[in-house]
Amino acid sequence: EPEVTQTPSHQVTQMGQEVILRCVPISNHLYFYWYRQILGQKVEFLVSFYNNEISEKSEIFDDQFSVERPDGSNFTLKIRSTKLEDSAMYFCASRVDSNSNQPQHFGDGTRLSIL
Amino acid sequence: GQSLEQPSEVTAVEGAIVQINCTYQTSGFYGLSWYQQHDGGAPTFLSYNALDGLEETGRFSSFLSRSDSYGYLLLQELQMKDSASYFCAVTRLGGKLQFGAGTQVVVTP
């Protein structure tokens, strides 16, 4: 069964450094999402992306965050200058179309640790 | 405001039935989804309700009452592997998911 893949599985970065988290959504999916989950807390929406542009973003997704689909397969999340509070699990998800009956498929996540 | 409420933990024995309730308060409601998460791994889709009523998928069933802003997930014939966190999530306009805080299900022998 096709799946969403994320790399790296764990990223350790010094505060203030830039980090790029990578995702390969399922190939025929059109809608892409990033979520984060701080340890022990709920999963929080960050951003949705469709047709090469951001559809919606949350309050968490400030100017330090950006997303890009540089080619036909990758979907990246960049944090320009990381802060301690960015430490979390980051999940990428994709959905095949706009039908709300279609589920979002999640990757295994990238654990981001900011020192 | 916008919120989802679900119990923090439920404990049950193997073979039992567990019901996880979820109440929500949100705008732009399209449907209610349920996801399973083992030890901080990938949330895995279990079920989705857009309309009132019961959806059955094997040992798992999900129910929705839009007028009551309420849903539940029913886990039947509990197995040890069902020990995990279960999240209800509202699907909102644009497809984004708004998650509840999760219910930790502990299955004991």
Image (cartoon, coloured by chain):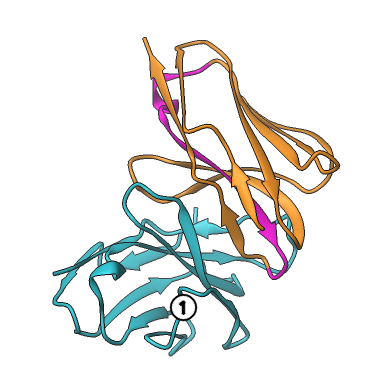
Between A60 and A71, the residue placed more toward the observer is A60
Chain ID for label 1? A
Image location of residue A25, percent across then percent down: 48, 69
Where B64 falls versus A12 (above or below)? above
Identity, as a three-letter code, of the amino acid under mark 1: Phe
- Left-right relation of A50 to A4: right
Counting from the top left corner in percent of width and height, residue A65 is at 40, 83
Judging by colour alone, the chain drawn in orange in this rendered image is B
Residue at image mark 1 = A61
Residue B84 lies within the magenta run: yes
Magenta stretch: includes residue B98: no
Q: Is residue A114 above or below residue A37?
A: below
Q: Which residues are magenta?
A: B78-94
* Chain A painted colour: cyan
Where is residue A40 drawn, in percent x and y?
Answer: 34, 46
Foreground pick, A80 / A69: A80
Rate crowding at label 1 as few (under 14), some (14 to 19) or many (20 or more) other CA atoms within 10 Å.
Answer: some
The answer to whether residue B53 is left or right of residue B49 is right
Residue in the picture at 72% in, 67% down: B93
Q: Choose top left, top right, bottom left or bottom right for residue B39.
A: top left
Tell me which residue sits at (59%, 41%) in the image. Answer: B5
Under circle 1, the secondary element is: loop
